[in-house]
Amino acid sequence: MSTDSEAGMSTGSTASLRTPICDLLGTRYPIVQTGMGWVAGARLTAATSTAGGLGILASATMTYEQLSAAISQVKGRTDAPFGVNIRSDQPNVGDIADLLIQNQVRVASFAQAPNEALIKRLRDGGVVTMPTVAARRHAQKVAGWGVDAVIAQGQEGGGHTGAVPTSLLLPDVAASVDIPVLGAGGFKDGRGLVAALAWGASGIAMGTRFLLTRESTVPDEVKARYLAAAVTDTVVTRALDGAPMRVIRTALVDQLEAGPRAITLVRALLNALRLRKLTDTSLADLVREGLAMHRSGDLSWGQIAMAANAPMLTRATMVQGSLKTGILPTGQVVGLIEQLPSVQEVIEEIVSEATATLARLASIPSVPSP
């Protein structure tokens, strides 16, 4: 079982923050920036890796050519390891896997569980595999397939999220597998990193904290809306694509939740066609993808039709800056973030606070044995 917390809690020095995930990912610190669609581009990814964490490119909203160019851009900005987030159900996922292998990308992360063959293909090519899970059984399943690490995202997390709070999910997952586990959902600072170590994790993964940095390309007016949000301003909705998704509550979200289902499905189908053009997916591939999703039993036809809603509505805000026609995926932690520091400052502050917290805990006298 995972015992990373024992090493992490043994001393108050910065060296105590070097956990097994650092060696696996090739990073100085156990901090990962997640692959957020339309947000995690080359600039943010390179900045995170340069600062000692692991930056992850979001590939699901890119064409193959755009991803290839983004990988080259990251490599041109930093010599540090980085990752690429992959949708395992993408029609060209094999080509993407080969692209990662050819470019010696360090990590492939997944928002959805990859299949066993894809994991083997990447691992044989020297790529570390790291899916996100929301339940103990999911972690055990992918660990049995041979993944190198998992991200356990609790309910507080932004975007698609599970039903179990991080404080319950993370220790449960860490105790159930013998691979490094990262905690996600509700993390933004050094105290959170120490808490994750205490729960048995090897580090933390964050999205919202990195979205709200100076290197993030999200429009300034959108960042301002995020900074104005309170902890209670988020909602988990299924109205966007049929799966639970945490976003800031807005008039559009309320409208989608209350609107007639037929209208919602029509809008979703139009978004699917728009997303197909943006990601250079052929209509035939789109149909094949939908059939595969339906055969898997995970989604109904209605949910499949809605699958492009979230990325297109997210694009409206994150790329076009439209607060009225887009959505704002976010973790609950958004209500505790008040500034837009650089990525370097974020990581330095986390490391400094975590080191100080570990030192403070180490100075507490032990309770004598009875």
Image (spheres, helix red, strand yellow):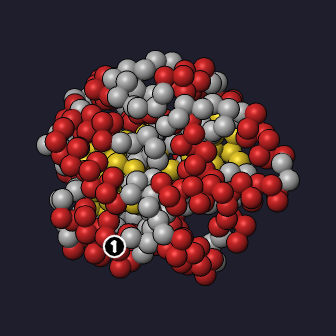
Q: Quadrant of the N terminus?
A: bottom left
Q: Is residue 368 visible?
A: no
The image position of residue 352, as x and y in percent, is 29, 23
Look at 46% across and 44% down and name the residue there: 38
Q: Judging from the image, what secondary structure is the residue with disc 1 in?
A: helix
Task: Bin the neighbour count of mark 1 within 10 Å (Cα to Cα): few under 14, some 14-19, many 20 and up.
Answer: some
Nearer to us in this view, 150 or 255: 255
Q: Which residue is mark 1?
A: 94
Q: From the viewer's perspective, is 203 left or right of 225? A: left
Q: Quadrant of residue 345?
A: top left
Which residue reaches farthest bottom?
A: 295
The disc labelled 1 sits on which kind of residue?
A: Gly
The image position of residue 233, as x and y in percent, is 68, 30
The image position of residue 203, as x and y in percent, is 35, 44
Look at 33% across and 73% down and name the residue there: 94
Look at 42% across and 75% down and name the residue there: 115
